[in-house]
Image (cartoon, rainbow, N blue to C red):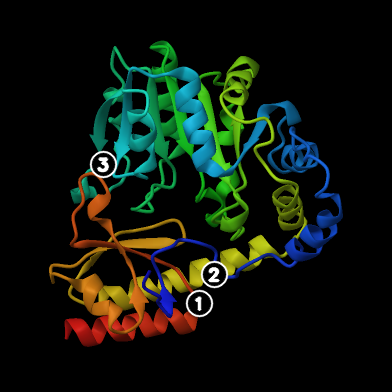
């Protein structure tokens, strides 16, 4: 495996672990001889307060991927719509149940913005819709009015909507954008989220989903192991949630550095797309850009594996100011 000094390919919070994580994990080690709480009760209590939802609306899993596969196995969709480009794991999960996949592509000409007529893609014969919001890899946000229209149309046609919000909380005003507030109103909605990106807890594998339908949550729980989240992972989540200054610091860093990157990229011969989260997508007509950046010790995400994109598209994470400045310097030298 190649090693890079500057890894912009992974969209994890550049602040690293919240300060409360290590003490909570260390304290939890004394209990590792015991089985972990299968209900993740302490975490559920904290998230209930954070999202102002009943504790019973949450189910926890071994990262967002675990929940994704549980959902697909639980409901066995025969035909599903994926709003593209999107996280490749949606399609991989659906293929495991021989699901027919329909691709609804966001228009590049509009900066990959979610169009008003997107709900029209939900037609007869669909069982499930996958929507990443903010979108990965574009960073575009689905406005709440459009999301409501999607949910209304899906409910009329008895279609389940799975909204992936793993990057939602990089948006400072996430409370007014998140679908989590809608789960009590829409029983056909499942929202997936995780501690992986926003709290930099990728190694702990801690995700959760939110749903207003108790039977759907029970079905998700049945399609996986009972002890899906380890004790240290639960402790890490609790420590992260109790680190109160972490998210405000994240917002300041991400907003400021994303603007710095946007401004710098705008002066280069490439096209950068608007983003609301902690990464940027850009198109560069110069081939083999990722390979050329390797010479500088820099790794970026080649987007050729994303549906509707190719190797001329690249995604970069927002990093620290020093790292971002070095990336812009390297791009300037390569593209000059």
| Residue at image location 50% in from the left, 67% down from the top | 255
Relative to 6, is 332 on the left or the right? left
In space, the residues marked 3 and 2 are separated at their CA atoms by 28 Å
Which of the two discs, 3 and 2, labels the residue nearer the N terminus? 2
Q: Position of residue 126 (x, y in %)?
A: 32, 17
> Which numbered marker is on residue 336?
none
Q: Which residue is mark 2?
A: 14
Q: CA distance from mark 2 to mark 1?
A: 6 Å
- Whichever of labels 2 and 1 marks the residue nearer the N terminus, that label is 2
Give the quarter of the figure containing the C terminus.
bottom left
Residue furthest to the front in view is 33
Indicate the quadrant where residue 107 lies.
top left
Seen in the picture, residue 12 relative to 39 is either above or below; the reply is below
The front one of 125 and 203 is 203
Residue 45 appears in the rendering: yes
* Label 3 crowd bin: few (<14), some (14–19), many (20+), radius 10 Å: many
Q: Nearer the viewer, residue 294 or 181?
A: 294
State if disc 1 and disc 2 touch (CB < 8 Å): yes
Disc 3 designates what residue? Answer: 106
Instruction: Please name the residue that numbered disc 1 is placed on.
Output: 320
Helix, strand, or loop for circle 2? loop
- Identify the residue at image location x=18%, y=62%: 312
Question: What is the secondary structure assignment of the residue under circle 1?
Answer: loop
Marker count (numbered): 3
Q: Are marks 1 and 3 in contact (CB under 8 Å)?
A: no
Quote the CA–CA distance across marks 1 and 3: 30 Å
**Dot 2 alpha-carbon crowd within 10 angstroms: few under 14, some 14 to 19, many 20 or more:** some
Q: Position of residue 284 (x, y in %)?
A: 18, 67
Q: Is residue 210 above or below residue 4?
A: above
Nearer the N terminus, badge 1 or badge 3?
3
């Amino acid at each position: 495996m190649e090693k890079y000094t500057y890894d912009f390919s992974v969209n994890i919070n550049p602040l690293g672990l919240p300060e409360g994580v290590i003490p909570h994990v260390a304290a939890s080690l004394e209990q590792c001889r015991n089985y972990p709480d299968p209900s993740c009760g302490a975490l559920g209590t904290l998230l209930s307060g954070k999202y102002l939802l009943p504790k019973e609306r949450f189910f926890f899993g071994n990262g967002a991927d675990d929940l994704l596969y549980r959902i697909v196995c639980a409901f066995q969709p025969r035909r599903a719509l994926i709003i593209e480009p999107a996280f490749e794991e949606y399609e991989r999960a659906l293929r495991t149940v021989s699901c027919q996949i329909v691709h609804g592509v966001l228009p590049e000409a509009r900066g990959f913005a979610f169009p008003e007529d997107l709900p029209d893609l939900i037609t007869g014969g669909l069982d499930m819709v996958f929507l990443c919001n903010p979108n990965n890899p574009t960073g575009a946000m689905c406005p709440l009015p459009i999301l409501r229209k999607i949910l209304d149309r899906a409910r009329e046609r008895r279609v389940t909507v799975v909204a992936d919000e793993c990057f939602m909380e990089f948006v400072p005003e996430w409370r007014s954008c998140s679908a989590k507030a809608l789960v009590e109103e829409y029983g056909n909605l499942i929202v997936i989220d995780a501690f992986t990106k926003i709290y930099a807890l990728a190694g702990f594998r801690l995700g959760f989903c939110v749903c207003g339908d108790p039977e759907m949550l029970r079905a998700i729980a049945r399609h996986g192991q009972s002890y899906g989240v380890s004790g240290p992972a639960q402790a890490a989540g609790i420590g992260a949630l109790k680190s109160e200054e972490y998210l405000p610091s994240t917002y300041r860093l991400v907003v400021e550095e994303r603007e710095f990157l946007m401004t710098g990229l705008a002066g280069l011969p490439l096209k950068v797309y608007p983003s609301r989260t902690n990464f940027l997508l850009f198109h560069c007509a110069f081939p083999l850009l990722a390979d050329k950046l390797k010479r500088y010790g820099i790794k970026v995400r080649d987007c050729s594996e994303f549906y509707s994109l190719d190797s001329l598209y690249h995604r970069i994470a927002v990093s620290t100011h020093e790292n971002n400045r070095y990336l812009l310097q390297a791009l300037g030298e390569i593209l000059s």
